Image (cartoon, rainbow, N blue to C red):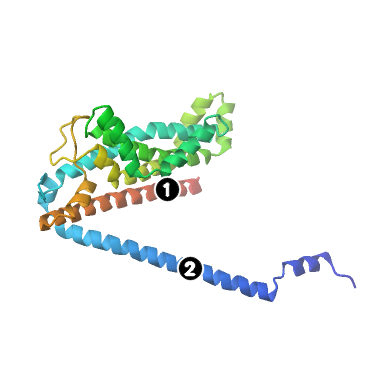
Amino acid sequence: MGVTAEEVRNAIRRPRPLAAWRRRVFNWMGWGFSGLTFVLLGGAMVWILEMVFARGASALNWKVLTTITMGTGGGLLNAIEGTTVLALGGILLSVPPGLAAGIYLAEFPRGFLAPVIRFLTDVLVGVPSIVVGYFAYVTMVVDLGWEFSVTAGAIALAIISVPYIVRTSEVAIRAVPNTLREAGHALGATPGTVIMRICVPMALPSILTGVLLALAISVGETAPLIYTAGWSSYMWNGQMTHAPIGYLTYVIWSFITEPFESAHALAYAAAFFVTFFVLIISVTSRAVLYRRAGWSQGH
């Protein structure tokens, strides 16, 4: 009686006892290592958040929110305003070129500029932010004569934000089904109309997530702003150049080393605000993605 083809296939698929035992051991080791890593990272995050929020909340009061910084005391109104102005300015400057580059990479992946853009994006992601600040200081603060200013700080943040927006925009637009593009072309729409009226609106939630990620990074930056925005204990006077501006991360970096309790309280409060802003932005980006995923499944 011969062996059937089905029995041969079953014999091939049937794992050897030793191989199955090894696979189970490595499987347990992998899950154990993953669980240990999750516990360590989660514990570190909870520890950091607990310390920042506990000390920051104890330093919060109405004076911190309504008064400007005075020496090593006072409030953080000028720093909160400066952080908002610089972060939003950097995003406004980085979204147009970042989105345009992402569209080009997604729709024309074999274009002659595509390899150059990808290479420059990869390099820019790896450049330390302090190097970006040094570059901005030499070119804008010194050579152009803008001195410490909002414009120099916003441009430095935009340089840091652009590669994140480029990559997220490329991935988001490339994920749009080709059937939608084909339908648009079948109706007589031009390539530009298909991109701007079909692809970009469909990919907008994911693009917005990348923008929010870049915004969170901008809120937490310190090194490039020290070289470009300087520091001011006063409210922003509206000038784009020749006028420094305050920001929260400077308070954390500078005041925590001062030998005064009032300075430490301001540093804790500033850390609270920065962490809170970043946390809100991150949760918002996740909510946008979750809503987008739910909408896609529903349709």
Q: Residues within 10 Å of mark 1 (few under 14, many from 20)?
A: some
Rendered view: 275 above or below 45: above
Q: Position of residue 83 (x, y in %)?
A: 23, 42
Of all residues shown, which one is farthest toward the right? Answer: 1
In the picture, measured across the screen, residue 123 lies left or right of residue 93, that is: right
Numbered mark located on residue 33 in the image: 2
Numbered mark located on residue 289 in the image: 1
* Secondary structure type for disc 2: helix
Q: Position of residue 65 (x, y in %)?
A: 14, 48
Q: Residue at x 39, y 46 (%)?
A: 288
In the picture, measured across the screen, residue 203 lies left or right of residue 128, that is: right
Numbered mark located on residue 68 in the image: none
Q: Position of residue 170 (x, y in %)?
A: 48, 38
* Quarter of the view holding residue 67: top left
Q: Nearer the viewer, mark 1 or mark 2?
A: 2
Q: Quadrant of the N terminus?
A: bottom right
* Secondary structure type for disc 1: helix
Tell me if residue 205 can be seen. Answer: no
In the rendered structure, which amino acid carries the disc numbered 1? Leu
Rendered view: 297 above or below 141: below
Could you tell me how far apart the alpha carbons at marks 1 and 2 are, in whole angstroms? Answer: 28 Å
Q: Residue at x 46, y 37 (%)?
A: 120
In the rendered structure, which amino acid carries the disc numbered 2? Phe
207, 215: nearer the viewer: 215
Q: Residue at x 36, y 40 (%)?
A: 160
152, 63: nearer the viewer: 152
* Quarter of the view holding residue 224: top left
Q: Residues within 10 Å of mark 2 (few under 14, many from 20)?
A: few
Q: Position of residue 256 (x, y in %)?
A: 18, 55
Sequence order check: which comes first, mark 1 or mark 2?
2
Q: Residue at x 56, y 69 (%)?
A: 27
